[in-house]
Image (cartoon, rainbow, N blue to C red):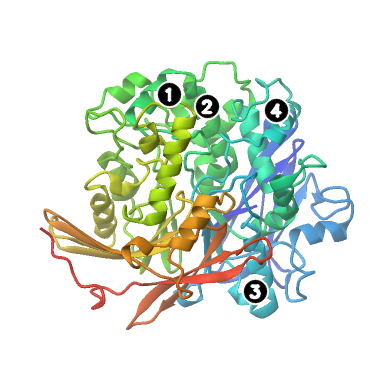
Amino acid sequence: MVRRATASSVALWIATKEHCVVRARVCSVDGSEVASARADTIALGEHLHVAVVVVPGPFDWGRCYTYGLHLNDRALNQPGVLAPSARRANQLLSYREVSPQAPALPSFVLPAPDLNDVRLVHASCRMLQGQGDDALVGLDQMICRAYAEQPTARPQQVFFTGDQIYADYAPAELAEYINDLATALLGWSTPGPSDHAHSLGQFYVNYLLAWSDVLWPAHVSGRLAATKRGLRRVRRALANTSSLMTFDDHEVTDDWYLTREWTEAALAGERRRLIVNGLCAYAMFQGWGNTPQQFEPGQPGAELAAALANWRGDDDDTHLCRLLGIPSVSDFAAHTPPQLKPGPGAIAWHYRVEGPAYDVVALDTRTWRSFPGDAPDAPPTIISRAGLDQQIGSGPALRQPLTIVISSAVVVNLPRAWYGRALLWANYRLKAIRYGQPRGYAEVYGPDRGDWWSERPGSVGDLLSALAAKADHRARVILLSGDMHVGAAARIQHWDNLGERPATLVAAQLLSSPLKHETRATRLAQRTGFRIIAGPPSLRVRDPGRAFRVDFMRAHDRTEIVGRNHIAELTFSWAAEHKHVDQTLWWQPGKRGALAPRSRFRVPLDFDDPDYPIVQPA
């Protein structure tokens, strides 16, 4: 997989069944070598080894590069390494069979220096046994379309905004297989089959099954068969597109740190080990590729990798908790209000990536939460003030004309009056009654009520003000989220008169979810849209010294909400007199339809747009 790719370096992630010396060679499309590097794989188990090879630049923004990997001096396309024949290996890795214009080797394109030429993708929420076809295949389709029509228009970067695996919802058909495979790969026994990953090996296997068909059983049925059919295309797309990722809750466990009562019980009980194992797996399969510098010798990521090479899951996990930023329950409760705060020496899950025309700010919306209020099930502050200072305030200035923020937690929730949302909540209540859950449980834990910034008064303003301050008090921002299992778009404008200088920010909030987890309720939500309030709503919020307005958008095909499985493609129009972003959702209308670009949401990004009048702070 191509992970973090910038002008200074490119990170390539690989998993193997034995220890290998991995040699990477990056070339221009004419075949001349640009740079090379090597790395040793790290043993996660007897038959599971992983590595991230960081190839140093310099590379040119907007250019296409090819790469080749050698494992113990054997090329990936050499017969018997990746496939029985070189021809078959090349089919799995490259797009030459699609178009003679495509490189014969796997390749990637760095983001263009002009926003008008930038092509981005984002998506979230991919459950292997979820309903419908896997929309992540759409990334492969985008690349194929580009080579058929305009090779320079292929995706340059994909953002996965959470729930890349559903460790807490293992397919029943695969539960025993996942456990057996984990035992075989690691070389030691695991707790036994379950619908929730418990052991470290089970978490590892969830990633391996999500990204490749190599380890799948020969025969699966129903929805899993549909997933397996698309995995070769998914694997090829991920080998040819730079990806950045962040976690939501299902990489670890459902409702992870959702409320104070949940957090206290988890940190003091058995779920603490779930958090440890889930974060260890995230670090090795996702986090390493986001921030490879944290896994260099002497850094906490390298210390974690060394610890995992000798860990069997039955030892004391205090050392791992320190590296992962998991506090004790006493440390959590020692703050007023109670809050999560990773200690010194912990891996930072948030990160920054500087590009030629935009900056990326990936937020950690889980491990810096605070829990004000007396009610134990009250919604949290998604990132505490200390967390915002750490993740945004202490970083370098945002100097590019655009900032892309990855937040697994949705910033502004869809309006309460939305008809489809009412139906979703009713569905959660019925499920709570069916399973004998206490009164009020569904309202909090069913729809993950606390996992939106807007549920805690002032949180949205704190986030937007922090971003505006880092951008010299005038910022254009793209807010990428998923989580809610719908696709939608909104324009947000924020005004802040509290600081030394007035600040303003205009943002496009772009939601894209699910890749594979549509339901009858989400499909109904797509049919109804915002019907109960006669079209996309506009919200205005005023606080002392601050104000913001939110305008939900309608797509060019009159769609307001997409509840089908989908993947989002982003393009920009960036002229001196007018600027906007287009989010085009690729979705499939039914079993007989094809995955295709169907709903384009356009969000204007001009300051003080007369179509969206200013709201004066209170």
Sooner in the amino-acid sequence: mark 4 or mark 1: 4
The answer to whether residue 447 shows anywhere in this view is yes
Q: Which residue is mark 4?
A: 179
Q: Up-down: is 529 above or below 63?
A: above
Q: CA distance from mark 1 to mark 2?
A: 9 Å
Sooner in the amino-acid sequence: mark 1 or mark 2: 1
Q: Quadrant of the C terminus?
A: bottom left
Callout 3 secondary element:
helix
Q: Which residue is mark 3?
A: 146
Q: CA distance from mark 3 to mark 4?
A: 40 Å
Q: CA distance from mark 3 to mark 2?
A: 42 Å
Q: Badge 4: few (under 14), some or many (20 or more) residues near its Cα, within 10 Å?
A: many
Sooner in the amino-acid sequence: mark 3 or mark 4: 3
Q: Badge 2: few (under 14), some or many (20 or more) residues near its Cα, within 10 Å?
A: many
| Disc 2 and disc 4 in contact, CB within 8 angstroms | no
Q: Amino acid at mark 2?
A: Leu
Q: CA distance from mark 3 to mark 1?
A: 47 Å
Sooner in the amino-acid sequence: mark 3 or mark 2: 3
Q: Amino acid at mark 4?
A: Asn
| Disc 4 and disc 1 in contact, CB within 8 angstroms | no
Callout 1 secondary element:
helix
Callout 2 secondary element:
helix
Q: Which residue is mark 1?
A: 266
Q: Which residue is mark 2?
A: 274
Q: CA distance from mark 2 to mark 4?
A: 15 Å
Q: Is residue 400 left or right of residue 69?
A: left
| Disc 3 and disc 2 in contact, CB within 8 angstroms | no
Rendering quarter of residue 283:
top right
